[in-house]
Image (cartoon, rainbow, N blue to C red):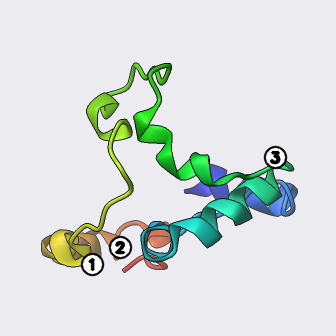
């Protein structure tokens, strides 16, 4: 988080913060914003990325990358809030997240 904060301060116009919940709620508008930020032309097929046959990924989420943008349960990580609160007293940088 310190590294991200450093680079956001150093290059404020070069880093785009993507809010996953906003992307899920309005994927067309947010994807257009991302493409605009990157100075890339947007077209509707962008949202059908999961249908591409030439999409390669070598990450742990390789199956997830090939799926549509879908809703997820926002509250599924609430059980970790107690843990975050506990450690935020030890690690000041966590305080802004809990």
Give the x, y percent position of residue 21.
43, 73
53 lies left or right of 7 = left
**Earlier sequence position, callout 3 versus callout 2:** 3
Look at the numbered disc 1 and give the secondary structure of its residue. helix
Residues at discs 3 and 1 in contact (Cβ within 8 Å): no
Residue 88 is marked as 2
| Residue 40 badge | 3
CB under 8 Å between discs 3 and 2: no
Q: Would you say residue 80 is visible in this rendering?
A: no
* 3 vs 1, front mark: 3
Asked whether the residues under the numbered discs 2 and 1 touch, taking CB atoms below 8 Å apart as contact, a structural biologist would say yes
Q: Residue sitting at 49 percent across and 79 percent down?
A: 96
The residue carrying mark 1 is 85
Image quarter (top left, top right, bottom left or bottom right) of the C terminus:
bottom left
**Where in the figure is residue 70, as x and y percent of width and height?**
32, 61
Say if 86 sits above or below 51 in the image.
below
Q: Is residue 51 above or below residue 32?
A: above
Q: Residues within 10 Å of mark 2 (few under 14, many from 20)?
A: some
Q: Decide: few, some or many residues near mark 3? Use Cα within 10 Å; few <14, some 14-19, many ≥20.
A: few
Mark 1, residues whose alpha carbon is within 10 Å: few (<14), some, or many (≥20)?
some
Residue 87 falls left or right of residue 48: left
> Mark 3 or 2, which is nearer the eye?
3
Determine the CA span between mark 3 and mark 2: 39 Å
**Is the residue 43 above or below the residue 63 in the image?**
below
Q: In front: 24, or 97?
A: 24
91 left or right of 13? Answer: left
Mark 3 / mark 1, whichever is N-terminal: 3
Residue 14 circle label: none
Residue 79 locus on image (x, y percent): 12, 73
| Label 2 residue SS | helix
Q: How many marks?
A: 3
């Amino acid at each position: 988080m310190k590294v991200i904060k450093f680079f956001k301060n150093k290059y404020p116009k070069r880093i785009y913060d993507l809010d996953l919940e906003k992307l899920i709620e309005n994927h067309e508008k947010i994807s257009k914003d991302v493409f605009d930020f990157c100075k890339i032309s947007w077209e509707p097929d962008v949202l059908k990325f999961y249908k591409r046959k030439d999409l390669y990924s070598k990450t742990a989420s390789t199956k997830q990358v090939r799926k549509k943008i879908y809703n997820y349960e926002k509250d599924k990580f609430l059980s970790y809030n107690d843990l975050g609160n506990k450690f935020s007293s030890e690690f000041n940088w966590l305080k802004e997240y809990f």
